[in-house]
């Protein structure tokens, strides 16, 4: 009896909102502590930084928690009895029936949208028609139906909070940041991403655990409170309630705006004090950046003139590379390795023995020791290697609809020299729009769909294993050789990618076989096997092999562009054609193909910004970028261009362990700033798809 008298009946939306907000703040606080404890070793959280990120984090979560209650206001509008009155009820019944028949029997606007929209519309409207009909014609079930619907809405909020928080933890482990543009990109490729998640984690047990926690949390939060179900408001009271929520929402918006514009010297602190869900929304809005609206600009004439000067281009935007058109045109095989950081290799201080094949190959190759990736995504690496230009702001050119670069690509250049140009990928080439881009820029695309099932020994959600794509490559190259035509092939590997699965029995691993390090070891094994098998082919002596990473395994650091997280290996192996050497000039992914074409004396007029690294006149510099921050490394200074026309410059200092620190410069070098602006302004505004 005492327990029953202690029950308090509350407005249901108010009860859900307040209890969820408290839970949201608590979960966010705990999540930040967990992410701090699992941050990379270079994070370096001081006491003051910890207090700041936890305090600002609570404010950020409070703002987002209030805004997330917006769907509940829509639910609140329907918690009235007026809709069941005779006239109103029949009108609603008729409108729902007409809408359902429309989407079920006619070509609707949802069919124009395509995808899963038509099915979702049919299911939703069918459910609304059936559920409203039951409540309209059977008044006795209305209270129970409303109670169940409200508890279901509460459960959805709690369940999604737990799942999204768990997702943030795994995203942090993978990328070292809160939700960002990568998470937005992954929404497009639900098949691959969901498959990757299912193969990488024990999803079913985790979902069951989240469900059990959801039930437990709701039981605990509602132990003394129940929903008031009837006569919740008059029209005047409804307007008052919605007005109060609107006022709180405005305050919450400005609270979020304030916390998400705060910046600090330590990017880990900046990331952790922000709200992950809000970061996701911001990344979704800013995935496409209009350069002239977000970045500091030079006058167009100055930008064009300086770009052409630094890129070595003439007034037509072209230059000639190579000394002569050699009648002896070597084949070129460009192996782009997924997520191969330089620090996985023994030459760059790794002591785990992960890459014995590449370590051996290095001793017989032309090696570029100080080469930096253009970005932190595969498409960034492919863009740099195929177009030889600095990275674009926002989306990569590869992913854009306007990606027909005509004669600007390496494929078009080598095609003009009589080469057969091919892009080989073990996955489905629609991923990241790779197939569309390469097929319209001078390449023949050969992906998983071109590999016979009986030739696939192992595959995961990302594609066939590296051995299988290399075996397919050998078949393709044999056919090319029979046609007496030189070939240029770019191979994109996949095995060094979560879930880090590969054929059993190929390598020896102590402990968990499904780790990044184990996958690196397998990829190294597959490359070594490929080179050995290729060496037995008649075309081998006339073939140049380039092994380079698309990007590093992680790009997270204290600054937005930690240069050590962009350092990648690059080696050119051709025993009969290229002399081994180690080149220690700072250079970029965009320089690799211009250097190779010059080395092989393949003369052609090109639009490349990339330069010949081996030329005496080469000026050491590198480009690196996220989707917003655009970096230019030159003379020990890193210039970073960011949205809101922000410009920073860092002094790069080499440490005794081979790593670098980045110290913010108080008096920037304006000459280097103008160079950075010219490069990025030209590429983003004046270099157009044809």
Image (cartoon, helix red, strand yellow):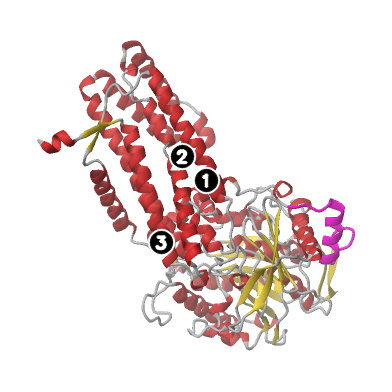
Which numbered dot is residue 256?
1
Q: Nearer the viewer, residue 220 or 152?
A: 220
Q: Is residue 309 magenta?
A: yes
Above or below: residue 459 compared with residue 301: below
Q: Earlier in the sequence, mark 1 or mark 3?
A: 3
Q: Secondary structure at mark 1?
A: helix
Residues tagged 2 and 1 counted as in contact (Cβ below 8 A):
yes
In the depicted view, which residue is nearer to us: 450 or 332? 332
Give the residues in magenta.
Answer: 296-317
- Residue that appears at 72% across and 84% down: 578
Residue 387: horizontal and vertical position, in percent?
Answer: 72, 62
Q: Earlier in the sequence, mark 3 or mark 2?
A: 3
Point 49% across, 56% down: residue: 273
Q: Which residue is mark 3?
A: 33
Which residue matches tag 2? Answer: 67
Would residue 565 appear left or right of 298 to someone viewing this image?
A: left
Give the secondary structure at mark 3. Answer: helix
Whether 378 is drawn above or below 601: the answer is above
């Amino acid at each position: 009896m005492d327990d029953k008298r202690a029950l308090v009946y509350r407005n249901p939306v108010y009860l859900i909102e307040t209890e969820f907000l408290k839970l949201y703040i608590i979960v966010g606080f705990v999540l930040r502590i967990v992410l701090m404890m699992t941050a990379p070793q270079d994070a370096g959280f001081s006491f003051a930084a910890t207090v700041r990120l936890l305090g600002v984090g609570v404010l950020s979560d409070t703002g987002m928690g209030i805004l997330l209650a917006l769907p509940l206001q829509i639910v609140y509008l329907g918690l009235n009895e007026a809709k069941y009155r005779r006239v109103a009820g029949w009108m609603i019944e008729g409108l729902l029936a007409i809408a359902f028949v429309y989407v079920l029997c006619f070509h609707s606007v949802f069919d124009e949208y395509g995808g899963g929209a038509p099915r979702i519309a049919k299911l939703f409207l069918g459910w609304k028609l059936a559920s409203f009909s039951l409540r309209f014609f059977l008044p006795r079930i209305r209270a129970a139906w409303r109670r169940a619907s409200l508890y279901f809405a509460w459960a959805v909020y709690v369940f999604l909070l737990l799942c999204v928080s768990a997702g943030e933890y795994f995203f942090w482990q993978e990328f070292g940041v809160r939700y960002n543009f990568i998470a937005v990109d992954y929404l497009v490729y639900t098949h691959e991403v969901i498959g990757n998640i299912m193969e990488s984690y024990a999803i079913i047990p985790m979902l069951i655990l989240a469900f059990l926690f959801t039930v437990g949390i709701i039981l605990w939060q509602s132990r003394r409170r129940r929903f008031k179900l009837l006569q919740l408001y008059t029209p005047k009271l409804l307007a008052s309630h919605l007005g109060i929520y609107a006022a709180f929402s405005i305050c919450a918006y400005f609270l979020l705006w304030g916390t998400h514009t705060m910046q600090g010297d330590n990017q880990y602190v900046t990331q952790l004090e922000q709200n992950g869900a809000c970061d996701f929304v911001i990344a979704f809005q800013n995935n496409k950046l209009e350069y002239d609206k977000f970045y500091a600009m030079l006058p167009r004439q100055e930008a064009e003139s300086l770009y052409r000067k630094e890129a070595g281009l003439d007034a037509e935007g072209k230059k000639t590379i190579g000394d002569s058109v050699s009648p002896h045109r070597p084949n070129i095989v460009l192996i782009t390795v997924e997520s191969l950081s330089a620090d996985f290799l023994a030459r760059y201080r790794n002591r785990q023995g992960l890459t014995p094949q590449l370590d051996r190959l290095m001793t017989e190759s032309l090696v570029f020791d100080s080469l930096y990736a253009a970005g932190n995504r595969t498409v960034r690496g492919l863009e740099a290697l195929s177009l030889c230009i600095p990275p674009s702001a926002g989306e990569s050119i590869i992913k854009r609809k306007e990606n027909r670069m005509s004669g600007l690509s390496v494929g078009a250049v080598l095609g003009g020299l009589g080469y057969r140009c091919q892009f080989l990928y073990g996955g489905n080439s629609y991923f990241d729009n790779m197939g569309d881009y390469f097929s319209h820029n001078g390449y023949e695309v050969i992906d998983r769909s071109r590999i016979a099932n009986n030739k696939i020994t192992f595959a995961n959600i990302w594609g066939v294993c590296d051995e299988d794509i290399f075996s397919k490559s050998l078949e393709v190259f044999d056919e090319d050789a029979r046609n007496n035509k030189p070939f240029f092939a770019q191979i994109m590997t996949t095995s060094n990618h979560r879930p880090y699965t590969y054929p059993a029995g190929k390598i020896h691993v102590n402990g968990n076989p499904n780790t990044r390090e184990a996958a690196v070891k397998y990829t190294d094994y597959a490359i070594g096997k490929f080179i050995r098998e290729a060496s037995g082919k008649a075309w081998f002596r006339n073939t140049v092999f380039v092994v380079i990473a698309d990007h590093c395994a992680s790009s997270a650091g204290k600054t937005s562009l930690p240069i050590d997280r962009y350092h990648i290996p690059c080696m050119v192996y051709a025993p009969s054609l290229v002399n081994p050497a180690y080149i220690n000039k700072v250079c970029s992914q965009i320089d690799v193909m211009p250097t190779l074409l010059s080395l092989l004396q393949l003369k052609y007029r090109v639009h490349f910004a990339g330069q010949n690294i081996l030329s005496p006149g080469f000026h050491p510099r590198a480009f690196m970028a996220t989707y917003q921050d655009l970096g230019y490394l030159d003379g020990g200074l890193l210039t970073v261009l960011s949205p809101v026309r922000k410009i920073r410059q860092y002094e790069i200092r080499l440490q005794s362990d081979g790593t670098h620190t980045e110290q913010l410069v108080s008096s920037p070098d304006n000459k280097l700033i103008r160079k950075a602006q010219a490069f990025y302004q030209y590429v983003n505004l004046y270099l157009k798809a044809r």
